[in-house]
Image (spheres, helix red, strand yellow):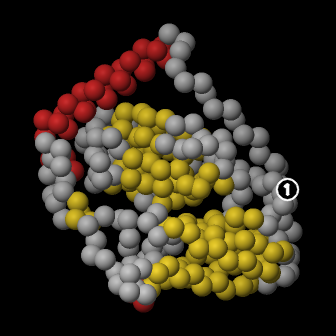
Amino acid sequence: MRTRSGIWSIRARIALGVLALGLTAACGGGAPAEAPTTAPVANPVDQATAGAVIGRIVFEGTVPAPASIKMTADPNCGSDGSMSEALIVGDGGALQNVFVYVKDGLGNLTFPVPAEMVILDQKGCHYVPHVLGVQVGQPVQIVNSDATLHNVHAAGKTNREFNAGQPIQGMKMTHTFTTKEVMVPFKCDVHGWMNAWVGVLDHPFFSVTGRDGAFSLKGLPPGTYTIEAWHETLGTETQTVTIGAKESKDLAFTFRGAGA
C-alpha cells in the first residue's frame, strides 16, 4: 500500500507531466490526432428478418471471497470497505461484468457508428462502469467526478496507448479508438486498484452482463455466428449458433472455478 506522501509524490510527477504536455501542444507538438472514422449511412441489416441471440452467464464452483481495497492513502477516496470488481457473482451464480460479442460471422458488413457519447467515469476512486463496449470511431468521454487527481492510462495492444492526467474534479476528455480490440485495459497510476476494460468492435453486437448475468445481441441478420464471452479473470468461452429470419436463440455460458 502506498503511503500518503508517496501518493502526493506521484501526483506531483503526473501534474508536471500534464503541464509539459500542454506546453508541447501549444508549440504544435504532441501525439498525432487519431484519424476520424467514416461511417456508412445506413444499417445493412434488413430489420424485417433480423433475429437475436440472448442468454445468461453463470459461475459454477466455489466463489472466492472478494478482495477488500484499502483506500485510506488518499482521503478523497472515501473510507475503506470497497471490494474488488474482478469477480462478482450474484444470485444463482449470475456472473457480472462479462463482455459478450459476435466474434465471427458478419462477413464484410459495415455498420454506422453511433454519434452518442459513451461515458467512462471516475467516481469514488473506481472506474464506472467496470466493463463497457464501444464501436470503432464512437467517442468515449472520460470524466473525473472525484475531488482528487486521477490519470487515465489505456494500454491497448492494437490501439494507441495514452496516458492523461485529470487533476481537477469535473475534468473531461474525449477519446476515439481507431481499430477493434478485445479488450483495452484502463488503469490509474495514482490509485493502483482502479481498473476498467473496454471492448472495441467494428459492429454493434455486444453486451455486458449485469447483476442477473443476462446478455442480449439483437438485430442480427440470419446466419451462423461465433459468440464469445470474455471475463477478466476467468478467460473466454465460445459457442457457435445459427439463427434464421426473425429467430431468437438462447445460449448459456458457464465459467467454472475451483470445486466445479
The residue lying toward the viewer, choosing from 95 and 134, is 95
Q: Is residue 77 left or right of residue 120?
A: left
Left or right of residue 130, residue 223 in this image: right
- Image quarter for residue 42? bottom right
Percent coordinates x, y for residue 141 in the rendering: 50, 44
97 is higher (above) or lower (below) than 186: below
Q: Residue 186 location in percent, x, y?
A: 44, 48
Alpha-carbon neighbours of circle 1 within 10 Å: few (<14), some, or many (≥20)?
Answer: few
| x 57%, y 81%: residue | 253
Q: Residue furthest top?
A: 27
Viewer-nearest residue: 75 or 46 = 75
Residue at image mark 1? 108
Of residues 166 and 236, the one drawn nearer to the viewer in this rendering: 236
Vertical placement of residue 179 versus 225, above or below: above
Residue kind at label 1, given as amino acid type:
Asn
Image spot of residue 220 (x, y percent) = 77, 71
Q: Is residue 214 above or below residue 120?
A: below
Q: Residue at x 43, y 87 (%)?
A: 260
- Residue furthest to the bottom in view is 92
Residue shown at the point (68%, 32%) measured from the top left: 35
> Can I make out residue 248 in this image?
yes
The vertical placement of 32 against 80, above or below, is above
The answer to whether residue 50 is seen in the rendering is: no
Give the left or right position of residue 80, taking residue 200 as reference. Answer: left
Task: State the image coordinates of residue 214 (x, y, percent, origin top left).
Answer: 54, 79
